[in-house]
Image (cartoon, grey):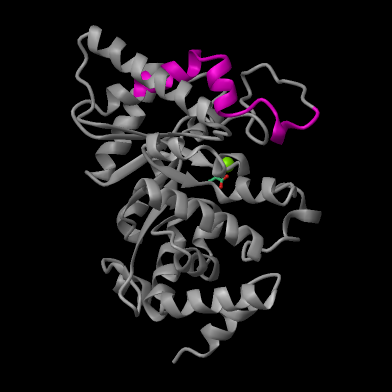
Amino acid sequence: AQERYASIRDKPAVTQDGQTIALVMNAGLMADLPSLDSSGAEGVGLFRTELQFLIHNKMPKRSELVALYERVLDAADGKRVVFRTLDIGSDKVLPYMKPTDEPNPALGWRAIRVGLDKPGVMRMQLQALLRAAAGRPLSLMFPFVAQFEEYREARAEVDKMVERERKLGHVLPERIEVGAMLETPSLAFAPQKFFDEVGFLSIGGNDLKQFFFAADRENERVRRRYDTLNVSFLSLIERIVERCDRSGTPLSFCGEDAGRPVEALCLAAIGIRTLSMRPASIGPVKSLLHRVDLGELRKRIIDARHRGDQSVRPAVLEYLRSLP
Ligand code: PEP
Ligand code: MG
């Protein structure tokens, strides 16, 4: 299998019915970057910046972050890297920050909520990203945005930092794209204006699924209870696809399901055009995409829904068994 994946590494993921899916990878540390070449990923769809903060026992300095982000961009060699600003709180607690004693951390003070309430660290990080990307394109996104206003406030922070950098005489990025992760169901129902304004969206399926089914992603007892291919969850994803299409907003999917071949196929069949996954999944997902007709798969998904199936998985597996 490894050899088969190597032979398709530099080929695009084009399906039997001629649809092209972009496959990009998730990363979090410098050590992940060599996988860009070895996996054939077209870029980094999710760079989890908190990992750098989690592996140290003190807050990294701005200069250290600038150096790291520069090395990441150098290593990507012009391929797009989407930096996600700090996603801390809940399961990701910084050892050097005062722990907050919260009854339900997953629903608590985390990610962009911390960034907006106590903007010091987020500003430092934004400044580091702006400096590291001097003269080249910068893509960044905010985690855990639950409503339009949070995106607007975060976006205003970016604009403020750009202004500050300009005044200080620093070279700015060639262009800046600011996006958001869609990982709370509420954001799927934001005003259409949000979809017009946001630079791009990436579905964080791990969290979106946990909140959609009210099933803790860390809890073994309930974690696997609900299928990602459940018709209700797929309807939510379709709704997001439609709203993004209407606004011409680029959309990707970056939860772990993007790297599971059967799940990845279904996401592509309902309109997701960019999948971001761990590097080792790129080969298997691409190889399966090469074999399928997404139009046919879509029909099977719609039929399953009309029949009242709980999950489209059986129908999809039946289709896969029928392939030559
Ligand atoms: C997600 O929630 O799907 C996601 C990609 O972010 P994380 O797994 O880091 O919460
Ligand atoms: Mg998440």
Q: Is residue 73 magenta?
A: no
Residue depicted at x 55% and y 44%: 188
Of the pair 238 and 201, the residue shown nearer to us: 238
Of the pair 149 and 166, the residue shown nearer to us: 149
Going by the image, does 282 lie left or right of 91? left
Of the pair 179 and 308, the residue shown nearer to us: 308
Residue depicted at x 39% and y 41%: 200
Q: Main secondary structure of the magenta part?
A: helix
- Would you place residue 14 above or below residue 94 in this image? below
The percent position of residue 77, horizontal first and vertical second, equals 22, 44
- Would you place residue 207 above or below residue 125 in this image? below
Q: Is residue 128 visible?
A: yes
Q: Is residue 116 magenta?
A: yes
The percent position of residue 298, horizontal first and vertical second, equals 49, 74
The percent position of residue 21, horizontal first and vertical second, equals 36, 63
Which quadrant, please, contains the N terminus? Answer: bottom left
Residue depicted at x 20% and y 10%: 169
Ligand 2: quadrant of the figure? top right
- Would you place residue 87 above or below residue 98 in this image? below
- Would you place residue 296 above or below residue 191 in this image? below
The percent position of residue 96, horizontal first and vertical second, equals 61, 19
| Magenta segment boundaries in residue numbering | 103-128
Q: What is the number of callouts on the image?
A: 0
